[in-house]
């Protein structure tokens, strides 16, 4: 990452930063690399150095500022045949099968330096962690590592199962790092790799439980937070609302909402129906939301 700046005396200063990335796709026209969003943020130019020492310029395909990830591309026309034969794309693993105690290999910059490697294991698997527009499993490793420079987790078959993240609201565990699993993110990664923005509504919520139903709360997604300045917030949706329909589809659970979200595009306007508590009952309110981009 190269950024052109000036000092207090208006002298030109070049600031550079090193970040790790992992190759997810190689085809006839491009090499696609997953990296941290901070690697491309405010950069005037980007370059990549492959493991064989060859270099090339980089273009940003798409970013996900909510998850803190970015996808960049290198044109294959910039690479020699020797380099193309040397590099390999990582195979995407199945993070749903990851269990506590599984051995892993952290690559990228787990030691705080790019090109470092660290062995470890999965110390805990958290389920149902609330994130923007859904919920996910989160993986905890047994080492304390920063994800700012890019730390990717491989299983013992060499498959990518996740990456260290600071962009999730999960409980802190001393001496552990929090990792985003790959399986829940695959549809988003596919969009980023095709240069398509990930749709963003901006709510956090939970399924309405049986106990909540017994209290008279309608079936749907109970919105615990309408994220500030998000499309949902700007439309008027509030914390405590129950999302019951979205884009014409009935919403019974967060999984229903996440499935609907996969079918919309950034910039599209959709209708959302919520139930809001009045003095003695819940009343339906219809909102028009312009889908944002993460």
Image (spheres, rainbow, N blue to C red):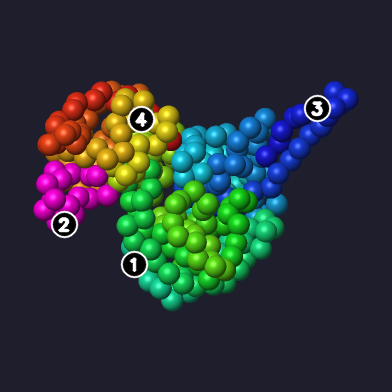
Residue 157: in sight, yes or no? no
Dot 1 crowding, Cα within 10 Å, few <14, some 14–19, many 20+? few
**Disc marking residue 63:** none
From the image, tell me which residue sits under label 1: 97
- In primary-sequence order, the first of circles 1 and 4 is 1
Looking at marks 2 and 1 on the same chain, the residue that comes earlier in the sequence is marked by 1
Q: Is residue 286 above or below residue 200?
A: above
Q: Which mark is residue 211?
A: 2
Name which of mark 2 and mark 4 comes first in the sequence.
2
Q: Which residue is mark 4?
A: 233
Q: Where is the N terminus found, in terms of image quarters?
A: top right
Q: Residues within 10 Å of mark 4 (few under 14, many from 20)?
A: some
Q: Relative to 211, does residue 286 appear above or below in the rendering?
A: above
**Residue 218 appears left or right of 95:** left
Front position among marks 1 and 4: 4
Q: Is residue 287 left or right of 64 when viewed as pictured?
A: left
- Alpha carbon separation for disc pair 2 and 3: 60 Å
């Amino acid at each position: 990452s190269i950024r052109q700046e000036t000092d207090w005396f208006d002298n030109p200063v070049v600031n550079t930063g090193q970040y790790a990335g992992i190759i997810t796709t190689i085809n006839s026209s491009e090499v696609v690399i997953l990296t941290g969003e901070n690697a491309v943020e405010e950069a005037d130019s980007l370059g990549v150095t492959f493991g064989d020492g060859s270099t090339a310029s980089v273009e940003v395909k798409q970013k996900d500022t909510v998850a803190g990830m970015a996808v960049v591309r290198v044109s294959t026309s910039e690479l020699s045949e020797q380099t193309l034969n040397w590099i390999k794309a990582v195979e995407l693993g199945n993070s749903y099968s990851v269990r506590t105690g599984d051995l892993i290999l952290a690559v990228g910059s787990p030691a705080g330096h790019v090109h470092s490697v660290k062995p470890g294991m999965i110390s805990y698997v958290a389920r149902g962690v609330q994130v923007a527009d859904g919920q996910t499993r989160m993986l905890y490793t047994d080492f304390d590592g920063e994800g700012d420079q890019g730390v990717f987790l491989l299983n013992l078959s060499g498959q990518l199962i996740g990456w260290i993240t600071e962009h999730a609201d999960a409980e802190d565990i001393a001496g552990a790092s929090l990792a985003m699993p790959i399986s829940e993110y695959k549809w988003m990664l596919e969009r980023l790799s095709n240069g398509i923005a990930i749709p963003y509504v901006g709510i956090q919520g939970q399924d309405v439980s049986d106990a909540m139903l017994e209290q008279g709360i309608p079936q749907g997604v109970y919105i615990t937070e309408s994220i500030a300045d998000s499309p949902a917030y700007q439309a008027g949706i509030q914390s405590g609302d129950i999302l019951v329909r979205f884009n014409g589809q009935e919403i019974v659970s967060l999984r229903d909402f996440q499935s609907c979200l996969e079918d919309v595009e950034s910039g599209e306007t959709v209708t959302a129906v919520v139930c809001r508590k009045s003095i003695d009952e819940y009343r339906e309110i219809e909102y028009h939301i312009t889908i944002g981009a993460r």
